[in-house]
Amino acid sequence: MFRKIFLLMSAFLFLNSVHAAPPKNSIQIKGSDTMVNLAQGWAEKYMEKNPGEFIAVTGGGSGTGLSSLISGTCAIAMTSRNIKEKEIALAKQKGVNPKEIKVALDGIAVVANPKNPLSKLTIEQLGRIFSGKIKNWKEVGGIDSKIVLLSREVNSGTHVYFKEHVLRKNDPNSREEFAPEALMLSSSQAIADEISNNPSAIGYYGMGYISPKQKAVMVAKDEKSEYLSPNVENVINGKYPISRPLFFYTNGEPQRLVKKFIDFCLSKEGQDIVLKMGFVPLK
Amino acid sequence: MRKFKEFIIEKFILFCGLATIFFVVLIFLFLLKQGLALFKTFSPFQFLSGKNWYPISEPAQFGILPLILGSLLVTLGAAVISIPIGIGCAVYIAEIAPSKVKEILKSGIELLAAIPSVVLGFIGMVTLVPLVKNIFHLPTGLTALSGSIMLAFMAMPTIVSIAEDALYSVPKSYKEGALALGATHWQAIYRVMLPAASSGILAAVMLGIGRVIGETMAVMMITGNAASMPHSILQPIRTLTATIAAEMGEAVAGGEHYFALFAIGIVLFIISFAINVTADLFLHKRRS
């Protein structure tokens, strides 16, 4: 009896150890929620063309992706922001050498409910709205209604980007923060859902998430500049004021399968997928 | 040989018994080690009484007062809703319901306990949140109240099943005596059964609350997670648990933010430990 149990247990242990080693022909990709759909699109097309190779994509946020890369649990971290000094230091400490590869561009759309009559804002106004200095839509020429701020959680690259470029206007000494009243939602989709139900809400996310249920607000650098919509053309020519590059990070120069996959993403076919997913190709 | 077998089994069971304690101690030590590291660079007073939670700014601000109050507010709301309904339900099942209804109700409650919290959170998000928004004419329905209602559903199974147990274990002679003295059914329940089972019912309530305060997924989905000081139950709040869950992925291991999240873990551990100990005291009181 006991011998049987012992055998069973050792069999389990053995099975587990077999499972723990990842198969050689698979890649784990982890990181930015903004990029999950895009990476999934690439992965599906790639796997279709290369049967027998397997690519798993998971979200969680840019920070999550980079910490997985550093701890060695994924081969590619996808991020919607640059790696931080602290993260590089930590990676070096663990013997990981993060290599940055730009794979696509993204415009951050500022979105409101289609019922909201307001259609354009300047960066200055956006900064004041999201830091809680402007609390009512009528202060920026809208209806008399309290503004409901929707933001991503702090693990989101989009959150960090928006804070640095809109709230703080690229000023490293600025101490602006999101208003404490801002609702922190855990995904871009959650913001999209709340926006489509709430006429007084404003939020932001990658332009790939815009649907007819939300309205993208036109944004201008300052009052004298042109108000522009977040679309492919305005992002490629660099006119739309809140756009950013999207990155893959790998440990050292990409090798074998990882290299093959990234080459595919950067190819004409890969960049067509970028466009199809609502993002902006590099060229 | 048989003696030897006996011996092995005995030791194995002893090991199982000790293992749980051992793990709890290990977890607590790990929490302490990681969490206390924060206080080398950040004052504990600032941590507990600060009103701003900006963990990734330079310099970071780790004030968890709004988070503590947020957790307490949601829990209080859930308690106000779930305790009367839970105890009422337990009394009905234990004392009044005919045996057929009783079986159906009991399995219904077990089923309620089996619904994963993420599912409850999702249902709350699509049904309850818009409802709360429209009823109270709020700018958003992602509020402490929505969280409280959803959490009340989660606390109820615990409260009902333990309170029902407590009522069931009151000796039959108490009730028979009361009835024999001419008390009505309700008088017997209210004046004899409930007081006799009171410590068990209190334990049920405490365990229900313990479940609520530790709940993460559902509150993260429907309370809005805004780390502002709560003034009313109709505004968005952020709880301790949701903060840990939402930010753990980003926190650089070994950084200040990472330690701060562990320090929140200590606060949570202390709160739920206190609740469990109180519940235990009541339970022991009942037994002796």
Image: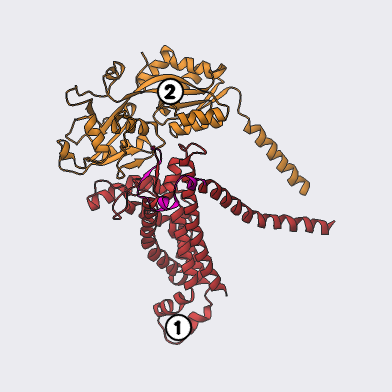
Residue that carries the numbered disc 1 in the rendered image: B179
Q: Is residue B99 visible?
A: no
Q: Amino acid at mark 2?
A: Phe
Q: CA distance from mark 2 to mark 1?
A: 77 Å
Magenta stretch: residue A180 in it?
Answer: no
The chain coloured red is B
Q: Residue B5 in the image: x percent, y percent? A: 80, 56
The one nearer the camera, A204 or A88, is A88
Asked if A139 appears above or below B84 in the picture, the reply is above
In the image, what residue occupies the spot 53% across and 66% down? B280
* Image quadrant in which you'd find residue B185: bottom left
Q: Residue A170 in the image: x percent, y percent? A: 32, 28
Q: Residue B59 in the image: x percent, y percent? A: 39, 39
Q: Residue B173 in the image: x percent, y percent? A: 52, 81
Residue that carries the numbered disc 2 in the rendered image: A247
Q: Residues within 10 Å of mark 1 (few under 14, many from 20)?
A: some
Q: Chain of mark 2?
A: A
The segment highlighted magenta reads B37-57
**Do tag 2 and tag 1 residues touch (Cβ < 8 Å)?**
no
Q: Chain of mark 1?
A: B
Query: What color was chain A assigned in the picture?
Result: orange
In the image, what residue occupies the spot 46% across and 23% down? A248
Q: Amino acid at mark 1?
A: Leu
In the image, which disc is placed on residue B39?
Answer: none
Magenta stretch: residue B39 in it?
Answer: yes
Q: Residues within 10 Å of mark 2 (few under 14, many from 20)?
A: many
The one nearer the camera, A229 or A62, is A62
Please, what secondary structure does the residue beneath circle 1 have? helix
Please, what secondary structure does the residue beneath circle 2 have? strand
Asked if A254 appears above or below B184 in the picture, the reply is above
